Image: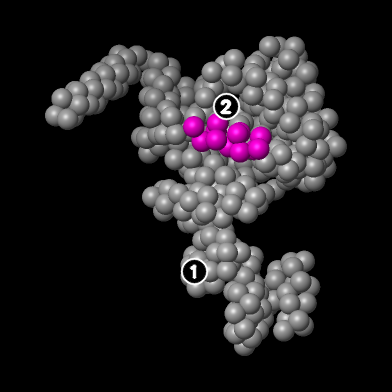
Amino acid sequence: MSTKISIQTISWSIISVIGFIFIGFFAWKTWLGGPLTQAIEYGKQGAFYHRHNDLQRAEEMYLKSLEAFQTIADQKGMAKQYGNLGLLYANRNDLQRAQQMYANSLKTFQAIGNQKGMASQYSNLGSIYVMAGALQPAEEMFVNSLKIYQTLGSQADVADQYVHLGNLYHVHGDLQRTETLYIKSLEINQALGRQTKMAEEYGNLGNLYYSLGDLQRAEAMSLKRLEILQALKDKENIAKQYGFLGLVYARGNDKQRAKKMYLKSLEINQALGHKEQIAIQYNNLGKLYLSRGNLQDAEKMFLKNLELNQILERKIEMANQYSNLGNLYYTAGDLQRAEKMFLGSLEMNQTLGRQEEIANQYGNLGHLYRKRGDLQPAKDNYLKSLGIFSELGNPNTRRVQQFLEQL
């Protein structure tokens, strides 16, 4: 044990020393060089800190680089640092400042007629608008970017913009245009031999077909994606793809193959130590066992999922799992434990402000009390559920009204 600790300590010491030497080298070059060299080196230091997630010092260096480029009126350098600052603020989720920096970069690239820089910043602005929920301006930015890349003949970038637009139309519910754009991107990436991008597009198409209920094509796309990922030895995404195939087979009522896929995903994620993905597969297996009436194994999986999510402090997933366990115990006729789980989910969802889930748990409690014969608490909980669903304009409003009428 002591040997392991000392080796780890030495390793971290070496990494720290290398980091200090690297930064010292930057500082030495900056001190020796003229204004242009200083501007470039500040930018490199900013990028170094950014890569190591030290956003405060990265910002300081980018701003110094920007100021230095402004001093010598180097517009291309200024545009680059505006872009770097935009990315940094986007990483911080400071969308307003990110938008401002990307817009400054775009304006500067426009002033010097740098088409590639303009296209890049149109795309970045599109992404910021998507994050802000402003889909119409996002579409305009992506289209502007696409047109420039098409003029430049930059096929890889054209393919990427097709994906951005496809994702946008997917959110809009325009699934036909989504499919067309994903296929266009796939065809370009196939011609360019971009294996990783091809895998992404097969995944996008698989998700699209799954959402449309076209399980045969969803499976076909997923298997093609899996084949590429296996060739690339991308274990993390192989595990995710096995999990997705499990969902496809489960939805198609092929429960045996679904179980096989979930277990493969679980095994890889356990080897990789990916706790969140392990928890997801426990949940998938739990739901599968529950659908087969195997309540004992379902309970084991749900409890393992809950334990991991408690460790990871994933409160939304914890609330969902309390609800799953409540439904399991309700099905098993263990109303006391079911009540405890539904109340646990209700309390956590109230803390999180998830109104639809709060309404669902009031409905679950209404069912439980009605089954127990406690009609007044059943009515009270149904009324609470009805009030929230009505306020949200949720279609479940009518169902809850029917439950009240049946009391």
* Residue 337 tag number: 1
| Distance from Cα at disc 1 to Cα at disc 2 | 37 Å
Q: Secondary structure at mark 2?
A: helix
168 and 43: which is toward the camera: 168
Which amino acid type corresponds to the residue marked 1 in the rendered image? Arg
**Mark in the foreground, 1 or 2:** 1
Q: Which residues are magenta?
A: 256-267
> Farthest left residue?
2
What x and y, as percent, mark residue 86?
54, 36
Whether residue 143 appears in this view of the structure is no
Residue at the spot 44% in from the left edge and 34% down from the top edge: 270
Locate the C terminus and report the quarter of the image it occupies.
bottom right
Residue at the spot 54% in from the left edge and 18% down from the top edge: 233
Locate the N terminus and report the quarter of the image it occupies.
top left
Placement of 317 over or under 76, stated as above or below? below
Quadrant of residue 159 within the rendered picture: top right
In this figure, which residue is indicated by the disc labeled 2? 238
Side of 237 where 6 appears, left or right = left
Total labels: the figure holds 2
